[in-house]
Image (tube, rainbow, N blue to C red):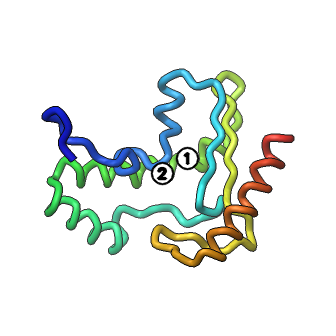
Amino acid sequence: MSLDGKLLTDGGIAEQIPLPSAIAMGATHALVLTTGRHNRARKDVAHIEHRLERQAIALWYGEALARAYDERRVLINKVPDALDTPSANGPLLQGAFVPDGAPAIKRLTKDHGDLQAAAKLTEEATKRLVAA
């Protein structure tokens, strides 16, 4: 979308989980609530799904946005590692992931029951994490 002559896009294209930006801006604490499991597979820029999505983005929105989409895949792989690595000098980072046993939630999940169940389990996991 264009606003005042600037092209704007969903922030999730550039940085799906803006943890690195928050740290760079001086955040001292961060709680990341995800829709993925902690042990989820890494996002591979060579995967066919990514390549097809990238081609569509480049075609419809341009190469600059397609490059941002590539970088997003690289950044998303760093977030679980940052949440797993305690830092004595850095910000306090915590992550609440979808617990094992919860329904798998994908970008296009529409099943209301699955969405509610995953939300409830993640809320409970978050409360345990914050209380610890």
Q: Amino acid at mark 2?
A: Ile
At which x and y percent is residue 43? Answer: 46, 62
Q: Is residue 130 above or below residue 98?
A: above
- Residue 26 badge: none
- Which mark, by number, is residue 76? 2
* Residue at numbered disc 1: 79
- Residue 115 position, x and y percent, is 62, 69
Residue drawn at x 79%, y 56% as measured from the top left = 124
Dot 2, crowdedness within 10 Å: few (<14), some or many (≥20)? some
Quarter assignment of residue 52: bottom left
The foreground one among 126 and 45 is 126
* Residue for point 64% across, 63% down: 37
Instruction: List x then y, in percent, for residue 72.
Output: 38, 50
Q: CA distance from mark 1 to mark 2?
A: 6 Å
**Looking at the picture, does residue 113 appear above or below residue 127?**
below
Residue at disc 1, secondary structure: helix
Q: Is residue 96 left or right of residue 15?
A: right
Residue 47 lies in quadrant? bottom left
**10 Å crowding of disc 1: few (<14), some (14-19), many (20+):** some
For the view shown, which residue lies furthest in the right direction? Answer: 132
For the point 80% across and 48% down, which residue is it?
127
Determine whether, in the image, residue 20 is placed left or right of residue 36.
left
Q: Which amino acid type is marked by label 1?
A: Val
Residue 75 falls left or right of residue 62: right
* Residue 6, horizontal then vertical, whole percent: 18, 35
Give the position of the C terminus as an image quadrant.
Answer: top right
- Callout 1 touching callout 2 (CB < 8 Å): yes
Q: Is residue 82 above or below residue 28?
A: below
Q: Residue at x 68, y 67 (%)?
A: 118
